[in-house]
Image (cartoon, grey):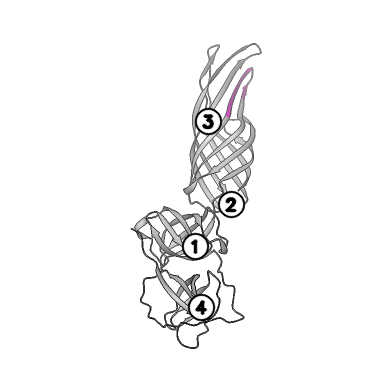
Amino acid sequence: MARKILIVTLETTLKLPTGLVVYIGEERKISAILKDNYKSSETSLVYEATVAKQVDIAEGEKVFVEGEIKGKGADVYIKLDRRAVFLPKTEGQVLASYGSQVHIDRGSLHEVRERDIYAIYDSSGRYKGKTEMSGIGDNQSIGQLYTGAKKEVEPGDTVKFLGQRKFFGLGVAAAAVVVQDQTPSGGGLLFWWTFPNGWGINWLWGTWFFEHFETDNRYIFNVNMPTVFRKNFFYPNWISPYAGVCIASYISWAYVGIMDSTSAYGAGIYPVLGVELFQTQLFHVHLEGIYLTTPELTLQERKFQYGGWGYSMAVTTNW
């Protein structure tokens, strides 16, 4: 059920900018956001203003800006040395909520952008959830609530900016260390997509492979074009662990001596654990481990099969 926003009208002789934060009442100091004026005459201008709280406001209450109070009626007094009209986007208030949608009092004039993520808190500082902005107006924005209970978000709750979700990243990846004395290698061009609430996909245009040597025996395992489906936790954050599964095709070879060999082809699903660093910045660092298990190959009554964690590191530029 939608929660209503209180609309009040203010009359003044001054021309005021849209989005100005004014305060109603000498004692209560109820904040209101000025909208466009809808009526004017030779002697006065009438504006509408939105108030997040459902409160009683009497006709003729004083309205002021930046704390200078004087005179009577609904005149607005502005100091010439007042601070900037538009507050930064780092903190704001919930104006209303509509099911999973959250309406806040920050917009493009506060430099709010699509995919900006805000945490929601009540007046006591209790965390209620996160919302990601999708509809950006001049002074207000609407976002989608994707963590927390929908019924708990109320007008007047505080929102705090966490960062912007970076949808796409492009960079390079390289292999690091693998267990069981195997020699890792490989790498390639890494494509990185992040969707709301930390879900994502990354795809390597390249290959991972390792080799294992024992006297005259040699085993090679090659994983091609791996695709990882992942879920980031504590998103967004400077350090965000993730878990997922990798789907990839593979080729494996076993050699005994110089001439005798066998091979296998197929596809596999492998568990993945990783950490993503600096999620809301331009450059991200990715540390990832994948548990590889190879198919069993038999050659000259010798069985070849290996398994273990392979590690990689990547750096991407993200937008």
Q: Tell me the crowding category of disc 3: few under 14, some 14 to 19, or many 20 or more residues within 10 angstroms, Cα based.
A: many
Residue 155 percent across, percent down from the top left: 40, 65
Instruction: Name the residue type under label 4.
Output: Ser
The residue labelled by disc 4 is 41
Please say if the residues under marks 3 and 4 sit with CB atoms less than 8 Å apart.
no
**Farthest residue in the bottom direction?**
71
Rendered residue at 59%/76% (across/down): 83
Disc 3 versus disc 4: nearer the observer: 4
Name the N-terminal-most of marks 4 and 2: 4
Along the horizontal axis of the image, is 210 left or right of 233?
Answer: right
Residue 271 percent across, percent down from the top left: 49, 35
Disc 4 versus disc 1: nearer the observer: 4
Does 213 appear in magenta?
A: yes
The residue labelled by disc 2 is 278
Disc 2 versus disc 3: nearer the observer: 2
CA gap, disc 4 and disc 2: 54 Å
Q: Tell me the crowding category of disc 4: few under 14, some 14 to 19, or many 20 or more residues within 10 angstroms, Cα based.
A: few
In the image, the segment drawn in magenta is 212-224
Name the N-terminal-most of marks 3 and 4: 4
Task: Give the camera-side residue of 101 and 262.
Answer: 101
CA gap, disc 1 and disc 3: 49 Å
Name the N-terminal-most of marks 1 and 2: 1
Instruction: Name the residue type under label 1.
Output: Gln
Residue 175 shows up from this direction: no
